[in-house]
Image (spheres, helix red, strand yellow):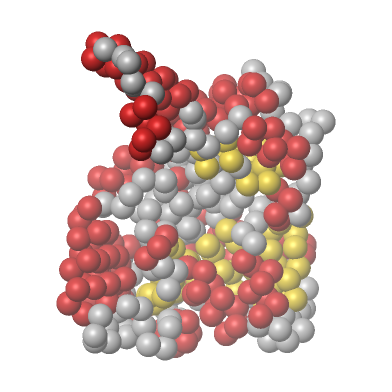
Amino acid sequence: MGLRGYYKQFAGMSDEEITEELKEKAAEERRKALARVDPLDLSRTTWHELPHPDVVAAVTFAARGALNAAGDPTAEELRRALGRRVGIEPERIAVGNGAAQLLSAATRALLKAGEELLIPWPSYGLYPLMAQRSGARAVPVPHGHDVERLLAAVTEKTRAIALCNPNDPTGAYIPPQRLRELLDALPEQVSLLLDEALVDYVADERAAAGSLALLDDHPRLLVFRTFSKVYGLAGLRCGYVLGGPGSERLLAQLAPELGVGTPVQAGALEAIRACDAQVAARRAVVLTERARVLDALHDLPVDAAPTEANVLWLRAPGLTAGELTARLRNGNVIVMSGEEVGDEEHVRATVQAPQHADRLLQAIRTSL
């Protein structure tokens, strides 16, 4: 309707009638807005809320004052802060453009053409690509979040195991004492690339430190962590890797040649300083909602695997992963289909805030 047509509709109406007409239109628009439910995206493992404002301020300040200059290629201040946090010398820490970049660099450094990278499967989709880009061969180990299965899959060509722990997408978890058994039994030539991107969601807080306690006794263990997940800084692209005594030379090879940008270092440093309470609160929400949803699913026609991550690995008997994904999508909830990692039965749903958990449960009820 044009401007002339808009005013023409009020011709011959009293002021009171015009006012009432406008009120009715406004009320109808409000009703439509309130009735509209935007889709809820539970397909990603990164935190759904904005980062801590102090981190945003630190990144902005650094960007405004340092974009015309190269940053510290060694990220010394950040490595020292990380070292103080985890109790490891900064020389045994390398900082990179996300844990994924460091994992890829480690694969290239440790594997040659024809050698093998074991991967418990299904898992993070980057791992097979890492092997391919290094000229090595990815060897999936079905249901491989099991020490005995992994050891049985090791051959003379195996040079490394990429272990996402807790696992994305299944939430499976190998506790530190079992990791020690795995490391003790691995042949000398096999390294363990331990990806702990989701370790903040493990219910036993001691487990987060437990893996780091293994570093001193196992020089072929590398532990990868990130600011992308619970910190909600995926766009910052900052991760780090920790090694045992004697790993300094290898770690130096994994860091980007020119380091990470100054705004990235500033944001990560501020996250270490300012985000403890925020991280603890987010962790508490996930643990509470994870337990609540798993309990509620007992009464619904959906199977859920045990999980120590911020994800649920769900299966509806009689439905394929694609069918379950589509049904939940019709209920305005978006999940990741297991087809993306070769699983035809499961879907992955992220655990977020209470209202999001309620919407997931409601979508399951109405969809099945």
Report whether 166 appears left or right of 278.
right
Residue furthest out toward the right: 318
Is residue 308 visible in the rendered structure shown here? no
Is residue 356 visible in the rendered structure shown here? yes
Q: Which residue is depicted at the point 42% across and 48% down? A: 47
Q: Percent from the top left, x then y, of residue 319?
A: 79, 34
Q: Percent from the top left, x then y, of residue 88?
A: 33, 70
Figure disc tally: 0
Front position in the image: 346 or 194: 346
Q: Is residue 58 above or below residue 323?
A: below
Q: Quadrant of the N terminus?
A: top left
Q: Which residue is depicted at the point 70% across and 54% down? A: 340
- Image quadrant in which you'd find residue 23: top left
Report whether 206 appears left or right of 362.
left
Q: Which residue is depicted at the point 52% across and 42% down? A: 41
Front position in the image: 153 or 47: 47
Residue furthest out toward the front: 12
Q: Is residue 1 above or below residue 56?
A: above
Q: Percent from the top left, x then y, of residue 173?
A: 58, 48
- Image quadrant in which you'd find residue 257: bottom left
Report whether 181 appears left or right of 96.
right
Q: Is residue 368 above or below residue 128?
A: above
Q: Is residue 312 above or below residue 21?
A: below
Q: Quadrant of the C terminus?
A: top right
Q: Percent from the top left, x then y, of residue 276?
A: 26, 50
- Image quadrant in which you'd find residue 156: bottom right
Q: Which residue is depicted at the point 63% across and 21% down? A: 365
